[in-house]
Image (spheres, rainbow, N blue to C red):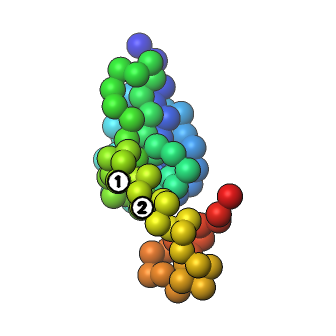
Amino acid sequence: MNIKVVAYTEEGRQELTAVEWCKLRMNPKTTLHRVDGPALEWPGGRYEIFWYIDNQAFTESEFNKLIQEVKDMPLVVRLVDPRWWVREFVND
């Protein structure tokens, strides 16, 4: 079976088989990260969707709350925030 898992890492979007996904997660240098949606999606709704920012897992509501807080920050505050991804975050 060739299940494709969609994972977002610091390097971007990747479509992986279940075996490739296991290998990727075993790599300690892999960081799941996405600020515009879930960072891990399993096909066909077989499993949950997962939200990660800088390898930290969030529920959907926690993720949405955090992203809204960042969107509401003035640019000056975002630029000095210690979290690298906040400094790079672009408001839509």
What whole-number distance in Å separates the C-alpha atoms at marks 1 and 2? Answer: 6 Å
Which quarter of the image is occupied by the C terminus? bottom right
Specify whether residue 46 is in view: yes
- Find the residue positioned furthest to the right: 92
Q: Secondary structure at mark 2?
A: helix
Q: Is residue 41 above or below residue 12?
A: above
**What residue is at 53 percent from the left and 33 percent from the top?**
15
Q: Residue furthest top?
A: 1
Residue 25: give its label.
none
Q: What label does residue 62 carry, if any?
A: 1
Q: Is the residue under label 2 in contact with that under label 1 (CB below 8 Å)?
A: yes
Instruction: Relative to 2, say whether 13 is above or below.
Output: below
Residue located beneath label 2 in the image: 66
Image coords of residue 59 (percent x, y) = 32, 47
- Name which residue lies at 42% across and 61% down: 66
Crowdedness near tag 1: few (<14), some (14–19) or many (≥20) residues, C-alpha within 10 Å: few
Q: Nearer the viewer, residue 16 or 75?
A: 75
In this rendering, does residue 32 appear at all? no
Q: Secondary structure at mark 1?
A: helix
User: What kind of residue is marked 1?
Assistant: Glu
In terms of image quadrants, where is residue 49? top left
> Where does the N terminus fall, quadrant-wise?
top left
Measured as percent of width and height from the top left, residue 18 is found at 38, 28
Q: Amino acid at mark 2?
A: Leu
Classify 4 as above or below 9.
above
Location of residue 89 by image quarter: bottom right
Where residue 24 sits: x, y (%)? 40, 44
Which of the 4 image quarters holds residue 19? top left
Residue 12 relative to residue 22: left or right: right
Which residue is at a point 54% across and 69% down the rendered structure image?
72
Viewer-side residue, 70 vs 16: 70
